Amino acid sequence: MATVARTCPLCEATCGLSVTLDPDGSVVDIRGDTDDVFSAGFICPKGVALKGLHTDPDRLHTPLVRRGGALVEASWGEAFAEVADRLPAILRADGPDAVAVFSGSAVTHALGPILYTPALIAALGTTRVFSAASLHARARQVAAGLMYGDPTAIAVPDIDRTDFLLMLGANPAVSNGGMLTAPDLRARLRAVRRRGGRVVVVDPRRSATAESADEHLFIRPGTDPLLLLALLNVLVAEDRFDLGANAGLVEGVESIAGLASAFTPSRVAERIGISPDPVRRLARDLAGSSAGVVYGHIGVATGPHATLTAWLIDVLNIVTGNLDSPGGAMFPCPGHRSLVDVGFGAHPLPFSLDAGRTRVRGLPVVCGEYPSATLAEEIDTPGPGRIRALITVGGNPMRSVPNSGRMRAALGSLELMVCVDSYVNETSALADVVLPVPSVLERSHYDLIHYQFACRNTANYSAPALPMPLGMNPEWETLLRLAAIAATGDSTTDLSALDEAWARQAAARLKIDLADVPGDLRGPERLVDLLLRAGPYDLTLEHLQFSPHGLDLGALEPRLRDVVATVNGRVHLAPADLMAAGRELRDSLDAPPDRGLLLIGRRHLRSNNSWLHNLPTMIAGARRCTLQVNETDAYSLGLRNGGRALVTSATGQVVASVEINAEIAPGLVSLPHGWGHDEPQARLRVAAERPGVNANVLTDDAVVDLLSGNAVLSAVPVTVSAHAGDAPEGEQPMPDRRSGLDRRRRREPGTGMESFGPA
Ligand SMILES: Nc1nc2c(c(=O)[nH]1)N[C@H]1C(S)=C(S)[C@@H](COP(=O)(O)OP(=O)(O)OC[C@H]3O[C@@H](n4cnc5c(=O)[nH]c(N)nc54)[C@H](O)[C@@H]3O)O[C@H]1N2
Ligand SMILES: Nc1nc2c(c(=O)[nH]1)N[C@H]1C(S)=C(S)[C@@H](COP(=O)(O)OP(=O)(O)OC[C@H]3O[C@@H](n4cnc5c(=O)[nH]c(N)nc54)[C@H](O)[C@@H]3O)O[C@H]1N2
Ligand code: SF4
Ligand SMILES: [Mo]
C-alpha cells in the first residue's frame, strides 16, 4: 500500500489529505495529513468523501452527445466533431458575443479550468463571460476597487493573532470559511477565546458558529449596513477613530464621520432588531481591543446592499487602526503571482465602474465579467449581441443563479450548449454535448485562488494520486480543444503548438524566460512553475515537489503600500459611488420599516453547493432541505413540523418540508440552496431519491446589488402558507426542537426581534 499527500480541493480550506492506495489503485482510505504545514491533520467529512466521489457510479467517464432528444455516449472525437459542426457557424453568423462562457465554483478549485478556461474565452473573443464570482464575491471586489484602486485587494482576518472578531453573515463551523482560507477555522476561533479574545457573531440564525461564540446578535436580514453605520456613529460620537499607522495614507475620514452622524443606534434599532446598548458595547469592544477585526461573508455578500456592507466592513477596520496590522485585516502574499498579472480576469487599473455595461440592463462589467444574474436575460432578450450558445465549466447555473424558472426557459432556447462537468446535473441535463473531467485524485493541484485569501502565506503542490484512466481527457486539454475549435473551426488541430503559444504569452506577461522552465513541463504544471518563479519567494514547481506537505511562507505581513493602486496612492475611505449609496440609505431611514417575511439561505457540512448530494454518506441522516421557521411564525402561519409549506416569491413557488426551529429568528424562513434534484434528464440517482426543493426558484434575477451586479440571494421577500399533505416520501421530519427553545435562545435583552412577525 502507498500513501500520498495531497491538498483537498473541495472547499477553500485547502486541507492536507493523506490518501492510502492499494497497489491496484483502489482507495483504501483518506485521512487528514498530520504533516501538512497548514492544516496539521484536520479533515472534514467532505475530504473523507473524496473516496466516494472517486467511485460514484454516476460520475461521467465518457462524453455524451444529444441524439434524437437524449444524451448518449460518444467518443471524444465524435463529441468534439459535434461542437466543430455547430459552434463556428454561430460565431460566423453573429460574432463572438453570441457565445457565452459560465465558469462555476469548481473552476476555482482545479488547475486545468483555472488556467485554460481563459484560453477558451480568448479564442472565442467573447465579452459574455459569467462566473460564480458574481454570486458571492463581486461586492468585495467592487468595494476594494473603489477604495484601494484594485478589485483584487482583499484583506482577510489575521485570525491567529486577533483578540476580537466581529463576524457577520458567515458560518465557518459549517462552511469551513469563505474568502478566508484557514483550515480548521473552528479551532482557530476557539483559540481566539482561549487567549482571552472575543468572538461576536451577527446572524439572523443561531448558527453553529454563533452557538460557540462569546456573543450572538440576531439581525433582521439585509440590514447589516445600518448596524455597521451605527457602530461608526458610536465611534465618532465617542471620539474613538484611531487610524494608527495608516493615518497618512487614508483620505475621506471626515466624510465618513459626516455620513455616520445620522445613524444613531436608537434610530436604526427597530430596523436591525438590535437594541442600542449592545451596539454601543460592540463599538467600544472593537475600538478597545488591541487587535480586532470585522469580517463578513455570504449572508452579507449576497444581500441587497452587498457592496455597501463590504465597504463599511473595511471602513471599520481602517478607522479602528486594524487594517494591515497584525491581528486585524491583512493582505496575504501567496507564493505565486496573481492570475491577473497574466491577464486572467483583469480589470483596468486604477479601478472604475466605467469598464463596460451589460447589453440589456446596463449593469457594470467588472473583472471582465457580466453578472450571472443577467445570464438569462442576455439569452432571452432579442437584439444584436444576444447569446445563442453557452459553454459551462464546473458550474450548475440551473441551481445556483437566481430565478431558475427563467433560466430553464433561456437555456432551453439555446442553439448550442456544451457542459464540461463531472455529472449530468440539472444544467448539463439540458446540454447538447457533455464533456467529463478526471476525478480529483487523477489530477494535480495547487490552490491558485484560495492561497490569495489564506491566513498564513502557504504554497503546496499535489501531483495526481492516481494515473488518468484510459479514455479520459485532462480537463485542460478539453478546454484547449474547445479553444482550437473556436479559433480554427477544426476539431483535430495539434494542441501542443497551442499550449506552447499560451505558455509563451504567460511568460512574456510575467517577464520570465520560458527557457528557464524545465523542458518536460506542459499544461498547468508549466504555468504553475511560471507563476511561482514570478512570485515573491522565488519558488519553483520543483521546490514544491520536494515538499509534499507544503511550504509555510510565514505569517501575514503589512503590505498596504504595495497594494494600493489609486491614482494618488491613497486609500479612498469615501468613494463617491459608495457615499451616494450611503446617503440613499440615510434618506430611507424615516420610511416605515418593512415587516414582511424574508427568505435566507444556509449551508450544511455534508454538501458543496449543488453537488455531493449524490454520495450516500453525504445525504444520510435527517432530511436537510427543509424550510426552517420559528415557532411563533409557524403558529401564526398554521405550519406544522414535518408538514408542508407553500413558499411564494415574486418569481416562483416551491412546496417545502417544514422544520420548526428555535435557532431562527421570527420574521424569516431559511432554505438551503443547491437542491431540487428532480430534473427529469439529470443522472444523479442517489440525489434524486431525496430531491429537496430548489431555493433559486424563489430568488429574483431582477433584484441585484446595483453597484456590483452581484446576485441577491438573501433577504428575499416571500409569503408562506400551509400546504396540504405531509413531507415527501423518504424525507423524515426532524424531531420537534421547540422543547430546546428556552435553553438555546439567549436573546439580548430588549432586542426588537419581537416586532418581526409577518404583517
Ligand atoms: N459544507 C459546505 N461548505 C461550503 C459550501 C457548501 O455548500 N457546503 N460552499 C462554499 C462556498 S461556495 C462559499 S461562498 C462559502 C460560504 O461560506 P459562509 O459565508 O460561511 O456561508 P454560510 O455557511 O452560508 O453562512 C452564511 C450565514 O449568513 C447568515 N445570513 C443570511 N442572511 C444574513 C444577513 O442578512 N445578515 C447577516 N449578518 N447574516 C445573514 C446565514 O444565516 C448563515 O448562517 O462556503 C463554502 N464552503
Ligand atoms: N440561493 C442561493 N444560491 C446560491 C448561493 C446561496 O448561498 N444561496 N451560493 C452561491 C455561491 S457562494 C456559489 S459559489 C454558487 C456556486 O454555483 P455553481 O458553481 O454554479 O454550482 P456548484 O453547485 O458549485 O457546481 C459545481 C459543478 O462543478 C462540477 N465539478 C466538480 N469538480 C469539477 C471539475 O474538476 N471540473 C469541472 N469542470 N467540473 C467539476 C460539479 O459536478 C458541479 O456540477 O452558488 C451560488 N448560489
Ligand atoms: S474543510 Fe474543505 S478542504 Fe478541508 S477536508 Fe473539508 S472540504 Fe476538504
Ligand atoms: Mo461561493
Image (tube, helix red, strand yellow):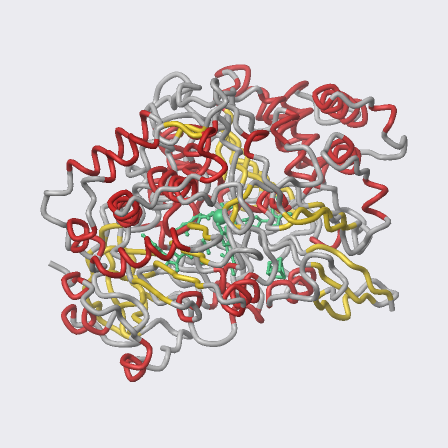
Image quarter in which the N terminus is found: bottom right
Camera-side residue of 602 and 331: 331
Residue 370 versus residue 350 in the image, above or below = below
- The image quarter in which residue 447 lies: top right
Query: At 49% from the left edge and 31% from the top edge, which residue is drawn?
Result: 151
Establish if 35 lies above or below 576: below
Tell me which image quadrant ligand 1 sits in: bottom left
Residue 686 visible to the viewer: no
Is residue 631 at all visible to an observer of this figure?
A: yes
Q: Exactly how many numbered labels are in the figure?
A: 0
In-front residue for pair 221/436: 221
Residue 462 located left or right of residue 292: right
Judge left or right: residue 245 versus residue 486.
left
Q: Using residue 680 as the reference point, say whether residue 28 is left or right of it.
A: right
Q: Quadrant of the C terminus?
A: bottom left
The front one of 56 and 252 is: 252
Residue 362 as seen in the image, left or right of residue 142: left
Q: Position of residue 178 (x, y in %)?
A: 51, 51
657 or 745: which is nearer to us? Answer: 745
Instruction: Tell me residue 348's x, y (percent).
Output: 51, 20
Whole-percent x, y for residue 142 in the image: 42, 32
Residue 658 coordinates in the image, percent (x, y): 29, 70
